[in-house]
Amino acid sequence: MSRLSAQNLPATAALPAYDRAGKSIGIVHFGLGAFTRAHQAWYTDRAMEADGGDWLIAGVSLRSPAVGEQLNSQDGLYTLAEKSGEGTKLRVIGSVAKVLLATQDRAELVNLLSAPTTHIVTFTVTEKGYCRRADGGLDLGLADGGFYPILAEALARRMAAGIGGLTLLSCDNLADNGHQLKRLMGEYLAGDAALSAWVAQHCTFPCSMVDRIVPATTDEDRAEVEAALALRDEGVVMTEPFSQWVIEDAFAGPRPAWEKQGAQIVQDVAPYETAKLRMLNGAHSALAYLGLEAGHSYVHQAVGDPALRQLVLGLMLDEAAPTIPAPEGMDLAAYAHALIERFDNPALNHRLIQIAMDGSQKIPQRWLATLAANQQAGRPSPALHQAVAAWLRHLRGDNVAKWGKVDDPRADELAAAWQAHGAQGVVEAIFGADGLLPSAWQPEGISL
Ligand code: CS2
């Protein structure tokens, strides 16, 4: 079976209705995984269709050649499959021009980042990709292996050449993601006063809230799409019909007309982001650890379990919602029920073990901020206490026999805390003021 390419675009899927060949790259994206292909690249594809513009995306993989291998031999094209109980909707996405591998294509990458036609750099490098220490500052040792040196080199070139600045747009699930990126980049550039001053004057770091559930693609997904297209597509991405993108209106230069395709451009992203992180992602992580323990594999199974459904509803409505300043016009109770409906999607097969990954990077913004706010207000957090206990048991290795070893950059330190302190002291060792994940929450109420 031949492979999807610009020459043999299938008639069975909606196609990009613009001339890709006549367009140039305007966006460089670090971390072109499944999420971006179902989200930012999809918004950009439709924005070019509606409004034109030179907004092709050059994706960057920092280490793994896998995505480049999937997409470059398909001219960057891939199929996005929106799945729900009602069926599957296919669209071939045209916004990705190519994928570069930072270790191999560094010169080309720096050239692109320094080109006057590049205006925006977007990031989905996951929580750990920002190379933060436990106190939130930049881990300089790790940063050298990340996107920081590449970006620093390109920014210096732009400054020297007198080219305009860049919009550096974080699309990861971090609280205040734009401000965090600005601070971390600032720490990386701290030794270079001239460049720091230039970046402060010419670049912006908008915050954004991104939302779309994108399970990792499986071989069955690829086979299903192959049958529908009569073509092999190695780059298939599966997602749900829902999507949301809220972006702070703080651009250094031009941008695609994302708002024509549903993105919200607002003054303050924080309320949207807080609601999404504490409710959607908070519930997701709780379903992951409690669901795995209860023997479930997928989100829709865990949320279909009456006890867990009740628990995450309580987590969202009684524990998270009271800590969130609701975004204008948004009803948090309705939001919680809509999230349950999205989790119920039987066609997605979203693996709990995928969400369980990297807990040490996710839990602070998903649970600890809620726990701290409730503690301060004298409100109980029983559902979150159960979720925290399940995460701790996950770290102890309770799910290893069935699901493999704990996948977390801090897994060894966290396992060592268990070994050193046992069930008596592990809570304090991890969440206490001098613990591995210190926060404003004074740990209490956890029974293991
Ligand atoms: C999930 C998120 O894997 C995870 O940790 O909670 O990827 C979630 O599906 C997205 O944030 C939804 O927008």
Image (tube, grey):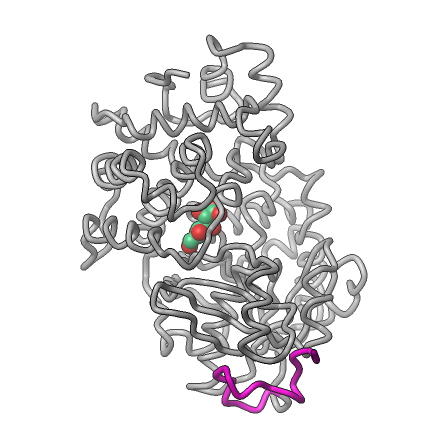
Query: What residue is at 22 percent from the left and 40 percent from the top?
Result: 317
Above or below: residue 215 compared with residue 361: below
Query: What residue is at 66 percent from the left and 82 percent from the top?
Result: 5
State the residue in front, 216 or 422. 216
State the residue in front, 81 or 197. 81
In this rendering, the count of numbered labels is: 0
Above or below: residue 117 compared with residue 71: below
Quadrant (top left/top right/bottom left/bottom right) for the C terminus: top left
Is any atom of residue 262 visible in this view?
A: yes
Q: What type of secondary structure mainly makes up the magenta span?
A: loop
Is any atom of residue 179 visible in this view?
A: no
Residue 443 % position (x, y): 38, 19
State left or right for residue 315 relative to residue 361.
Answer: left
Q: Quadrant of residue 219?
A: bottom right
Residue 350 % position (x, y): 46, 51
Query: What residue is at 32 percent from the left and 53 percent from the top?
Result: 272
Above or below: residue 369 compared with residue 265: above
Image: magenta residue range:
1-20
Above or below: residue 42 compared with residue 346: below
Quadrant (top left/top right/bottom left/bottom right) for the N terminus: bottom right
Residue 420 % position (x, y): 59, 10
Residue 64 % position (x, y): 72, 55
